[in-house]
Amino acid sequence: RKAVVIATGRDGTRTVFSWPELTLTAAGTEAMVAYERDVAPLPASDGPLALHVPGDERSIARDVKQLQRIEVRILRD
């Protein structure tokens, strides 16, 4: 419960999710790592991997293009 997930794109773009957010909200349960769209590989400007969160209700989209890394960090008290 005391963890965050950090997704980083090739250009250094980062987005952060709390563990409860990923496990207890619609946005979290819909989060996906995509490698293709419409049965074709993602274009180079988006892929080869991308993080997509279709149900995210935040005012700023937290999708990450050209996904390079996903980290899970345990937070300490």
Image (cartoon, grey):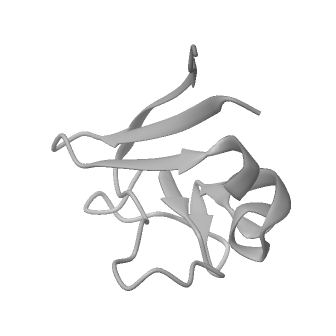
Tell which residue pokes out farthest to the left in this image: 11
Residue 52 drawn above or below residue 20: below
Is there any visible trace of residue 2 in the rendered image? Answer: yes
Tell which residue pokes out farthest to the top in this image: 76
The image position of residue 28, as x and y in percent, is 72, 62
Closest to the observer: 72 or 40?
72
Residue 49 drawn above or below residue 68: below
Image point (60%, 58%), residue name: 34
Tell which residue pokes out farthest to the front in this image: 77
The image position of residue 65, as x and y in percent, is 35, 57
Residue 68 drawn above or below residue 56: above
Please give the count of numbered marks on the rendered protein.
0
Image point (76%, 69%), residue name: 30
Residue 50 drawn above or below residue 57: above
Residue 7 lies in what quarter of the image? Answer: top left
Residue 31 lies in what quarter of the image? Answer: bottom right
Image point (56%, 20%), residue name: 75
Image point (42%, 66%), residue name: 62
Closest to the observer: 74 or 32?
74
The image position of residue 67, as x and y in percent, is 40, 44
48 with respect to 52 (left or right): left
Q: Quadrant of the C terminus?
A: top right
Closest to the observer: 15 or 66?
15
Q: Quadrant of the N terminus?
A: top right
2 with respect to 76 (left or right): right
47 with respect to 1 (left or right): left
